Amino acid sequence: MLHNYKITNLEIPELPKLIAEKFSVWPQVTAVVLAGSRTIRPADELSDFDIYLYADREIHPDIREKIAIELSDRYEINNQFWEPGDELIDRATGCGVDIMYRTPEWIEEQIDRLLLEHQASVGYSTCFWWNVLTSEVLYDGSGWFQKLQETVDKPYPEALRQAIIAKNHPILRDNISSFHHQLASAVSRQDSISIVHRTAALLGSYFDIIFALNCIPHPGEKRLVELAKSLCSKLPKYFDRQIDSVTNCVSLLGENRQILAATDELIDSLDELLVEENLIVLKSDAESAIELELDANFTSR
């Protein structure tokens, strides 16, 4: 495999195997897979079981509730907050289980958007690619999911890499409406909620660039520092310290502007790495001076 992020010879626990067995009897079910933090290196045994069920048409919520009742005293059926799904706490083990429902056509469209059309997002661009690559098959009646995994195990497209950086880098600090400019305005307003929100968005795009730069599909929201250090051969200088500085400054309220200095240092180090890799060209001193003036006017509003 070109992309090998899964645990080698993973011993799948009985609970996800049992759930896959109960669902696999229904003819509309194409595949059932285990993904998330339970399947990747380093393992996270504290994580819930993330089970993805691919079906040609919906399995009725009444059927899903009957399965949940067999396993759990506490469950939720047909949640629609993110992907359609059910959640339950296993009666025997106390483990949490998330069961998410997708159609084969939907995930194929998401993969084509990335690997054929090279469409980037604002943060987390390639998470669905990572999800498919790191899934462990529990049931695959027709072999469709195995073929899908073989299809997506391909080199990282350079056009996609460039698209992710082009979409996410300007909104870190360069654009008038960048996250850094919005953060500066939030600090001036002493708006602690906005400071947290804009910092999180800035870090979302920052890590999207980090993983794209290294030609690694994005692993999602959890353990990003740990996974970046284990998977990425190229990281900005002082990566750990600067991330800690940014996250520690978020809790400082009032007009404390340390968060702005911390994010500036974070972006400066990223820019240095991107220049070294010939992925961006820094602006001239004159252009930077104009932007500083615009930033000052923006934050005074």
Image (tube, grey):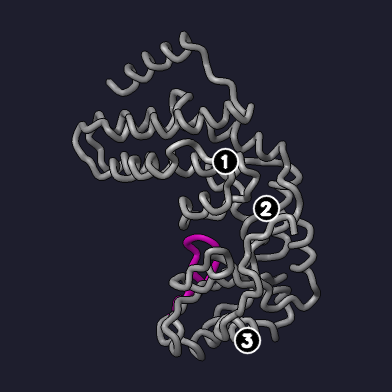
Considering every residue shown, the one lying at the far top of the view is 286
Marks 2 & 3, CB-CB < 8 Å contact: no
How many residues crowd mark 1 within 10 Å: few (<14), some (14–19), many (20+)? some
Q: Foreground: 192 or 301?
A: 192
Give the amino acid at mark 1.
Lys
Which SS class for mark 3? helix
Task: Decide which of 18, 156 is in the foreground and name it.
Answer: 156
Q: Nearer the viewer, residue 166 or 300?
A: 166
| Image quadrant assignment for residue 16 | bottom right
Indicate left or right for 23 with 256 as reference: right
The disc label shown at residue 118, or none: none
Q: Which amino acid does the dot numbered 2 rest on?
A: Gln
Res. 110 mark: 2
Tell me the residue at 44%/23% (across/down): 176
Q: Residue at x 19, y 36 (%)?
A: 254
The local crowd at label 2, few if under 14, some if 14 to 19, many if 20 or more residues have their Cα within 10 Å, is some
* Residue 62 at least partly seen: no
Give the residue number, with chain letter if any, for mark 3.
Answer: 22
